[in-house]
Image (spheres, rainbow, N blue to C red):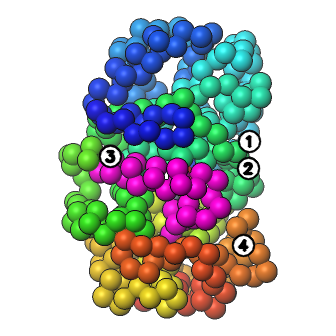
Amino acid sequence: MLEVKSQGYSVIIGDDSITHLNNFLIENKQYSNYFIIVDENTVEHCLPTLLTNIDCLSKAEVIQTESGEENKTIEIVTQVWYAMSDAHADRKALVINLGGGVISDMGGFIASTYKRGVDFLNVATTLLSQVDASVGGKLGIDLGGLKNQVGVFNFPQMVVIYPPFLSTLEFRQLRSGFAEVLKHALIQDANYWEKVKNIEVTTDYDWNEIIEQSVQIKNKVVLEDPTEQGLRKILNFGHTIGHAIETWHLENDPNFFLHGEAIAIGMIAEGYLSNQKTGLSEAELNEMVDVLRRVYDLKPIPPEKFEAYCDLMIHDKKNSDGKISCSLLTKIGNCKWDVFANKDDLLNALEYYNKTVA
Ligand SMILES: NC(=O)c1ccc[n+]([C@@H]2O[C@H](COP(=O)([O-])OP(=O)(O)OC[C@H]3O[C@@H](n4cnc5c(N)ncnc54)[C@H](O)[C@@H]3O)[C@@H](O)[C@H]2O)c1
Ligand SMILES: [Zn+2]
């Protein structure tokens, strides 16, 4: 088991992390009741493991939501608030988010606002949430198709990462999470890149070490800059363009791209911008593009969509005056933030993407 200390809470990683959660609940008797937020997949594949190993959860209320980014909305939040209220959840309730990034972002937001805030913890069940989303305190929901438009920073009591949960995850979901792993290596650690660039993404792969290393990278960054005044922006590499693509498709054809799939495209396009603006060498650009092409089924995007993506970027909450703030690589393992791009730069980057995957 590895314990990574974050802002006032620990991230517990390993096959005995569920035992650790059991001990935490035995030691923390102040909770009046437990509310486990699940979706239709985690209720089936993950909840039984919690209930068989943690006796005190037998009295927990299980609140089921529907999976998917299109359900990370205020409507679902309201349903869960009602479910908690109807079950007389008081300020000593503990919310347990059992799921991927959608459940931890939304469940954390629900807990942080219900009765002005009750405690919560995350039991992360997807690779994406185990390596990234469950750690760092960014919580929230989408609004009218705009990603993470409403939210807060707040911290869980604990993050529990039980790698065996990954055995039931669909391949596409696993591969989506792997995009954040590649991102961590590209922005912070050239040695880690040497390791991850050769990984064959399969359920059989032993993910423990990767989860440990990625959590440590993300945690180090968020501890240095919890509220994203500077350094934390490097975690947005690939996300300026990637989020715009994800957002557009969410509105127009949900599930077309999973989060990590859109970020993989974003990393290629922003890799190109890194080569143009921050000195990423041609050789390193080609190397990262080759890895992303090997892992993901990348196809050209009809160029008539580029305008719509650009509009979304121009109106993104992080940007102003038509200037788009990007985090770009200077080399593999190093990333610079607050580098500005204009619309032409973005169009060129998207064209580069199309050319490389054609
Ligand atoms: N807060 C942050 O710092 C942060 C960072 C990165 C991403 N995110 C957010 O995370 C979200 C994406 O997270 P995600 O990819 O985990 O999505 P998700 O929560 O939708 O999970 C993906 C799918 O896997 C299913 N699933 C979950 N665990 C399973 C298991 N063990 N076995 C079988 N199926 C399982 C879910 O039901 C869902 O269908 C996005 O909304 C993104 O914005 C947040
Ligand atoms: Zn991401």
Q: Residue at x 32, y 51 (%)?
A: 213
Is residue 197 left or right of 228 when viewed as pictured?
Answer: left
**Label 2: which residue?**
150
Q: Residues within 10 Å of mark 4 (few under 14, many from 20)?
A: some
Eye-nearest disc, 1 or 3: 3
Is 215 within the magenta? Answer: yes
Quadrant in the picture for the N terminus: top left
Q: Is residue 88 left or right of residue 299?
A: right
The answer for how far apart the CA atoms under marks 2 and 1 are is 9 Å
- In this rendered view, identify the residue nearer to me: 229 or 154: 229
| Three-letter code, disc 4 | Asn
Query: Which amino acid type is marked by label 2?
Result: Val
State which tag comes first along the sequence, 2 or 1. 1
Of the numbered discs in the image, which one, if any, rests on residue 142?
A: none
* Magenta residues, dominant SS class: helix
Q: Which mark is residue 212?
A: 3
Q: Is residue 108 above or below residue 347?
A: above
Mark 1 and mark 4 in contact (Cβ < 8 Å)?
Answer: no
Q: Is residue 83 above or below residue 320?
A: above
Q: Which residue is mark 4?
A: 319
Q: Which residues are magenta?
A: 210-237
State the CA–CA distance, disc 4 to disc 2.
16 Å
* Residue under label 1: 74
Instruction: Describe the element under mark 4 as helix, strand or loop.
Output: loop
Residue 262 visible, this orientation: no
Q: Assess whether mark 1 and mark 2 are in contact (beta carbons under 8 angstroms).
A: yes
